[in-house]
Amino acid sequence: MQKINFIKMHGLGNDFVIIDNRNKLVAITDELIKKLSDRRRGAGCDQLITINNPKGKEDVIIEIYNASGDKAEACGNGTRCVAKLIMEEKNQNSVNILSDAGLLKAKRIDKNNISVNMGKVSNEWNHIPLSEKLDTLNIPINIVGFTKGVAVNVGNPHIVFFGKDLNNLDLLKLGPEIEHHKFFPNKTNVEFIKIINSKTIEMKVWERGVGITYACGSGACAAVFAGIKKNLLSNHVEVKLLKGSLNISIVNDEAIMIGPAEISYHGKVEI
């Protein structure tokens, strides 16, 4: 049996098992992902993230796996968690992290908070991608009490719905239906938004390959970008989630996210 060391971290309850793969290569298999992500038999997590040796000017490379075993291109909360580890390791106040979504630049804001530039956000139909050319500001998925969806790519696909009541939302039913909708060949993350004012929103999220999560960094970025495109929000918005808030700024179509990252514990598993 192989002993695997890991770090359990979270950003506002969106939790991760992080494996440092720079010195001892751990094969990431479906068996390992399912064992570690299982909340009854493993550590429990929304995503498993590996830290890998750089190949260029980046500090590290990360790979992100959803609890389902699918790879994810981007994860804002997870990137902040890795950034915190690497900044502490290197005694730096900034790091560059390469993911499948591109190079992500992270900075330390204070003792608790880290910012990550998630890069360019797009609502071009073929960037998301969609299975056919549609008006991405009015995706024809009808949900009672909500607007038509706004499709957005933040390194990964999202669809955002705006409404007034999040409390009576049947996310367990709607989430998987929309995630697997025919419009999204790579499936999609799903966000439901209540606007409090132009600078404050509440969000509930269904993550692709995971399910309901406490928070989603890329989803918060997608929500604010969508709100700006619909002339509903300003460029600087507090996104309220179940366990706290993320602060999102959209500058020249780039999403900059500020939020906390915390270590829960260091662990070891045999497999």
Image (spheres, rainbow, N blue to C red):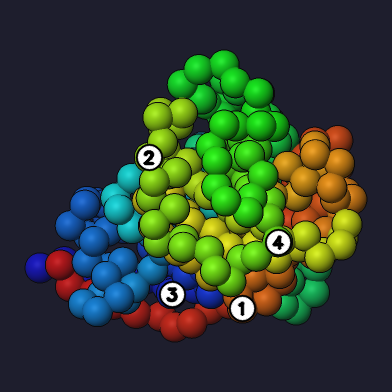
| Amino acid at the residue labelled 3 | Lys
Q: CA distance from mark 3 to mark 1?
A: 17 Å
The earlier-in-sequence mark between 1 and 2 is 2
Residue 251, given in percent of the width and then of the height, sits at 86, 42
| Element assignment for label 4 | loop
Residue 120, given in percent of the width and then of the height, sits at 72, 35
The earlier-in-sequence mark between 3 and 1 is 3
Q: CA distance from mark 3 to mark 2?
A: 29 Å
Q: Nearer the viewer, mark 4 or mark 2?
A: 4
79 lies above or below 148: below
Classify residue 90 by image quadrant: bottom right
Query: In percent of the image, x 77 and y 46: which residue is there?
Result: 227
| Element assignment for label 2 | loop
Residue under circle 1? Answer: 243
Residue under circle 4? Answer: 164
The earlier-in-sequence mark between 3 and 2 is 3
Residue under circle 2? Answer: 180
Q: CA distance from mark 4 to mark 2?
A: 25 Å
Q: Crowdedness of circle 1 by 10 Å Cα count: few (<14), some, many (20+)?
A: few
Q: Crowdedness of circle 3 by 10 Å Cα count: few (<14), some, many (20+)?
A: many
On the rendered structure, is 196 left or right of 66?
Answer: right
Placement of the N terminus among the 4 image quadrants: bottom left
Q: Residue furthest bottom?
A: 265
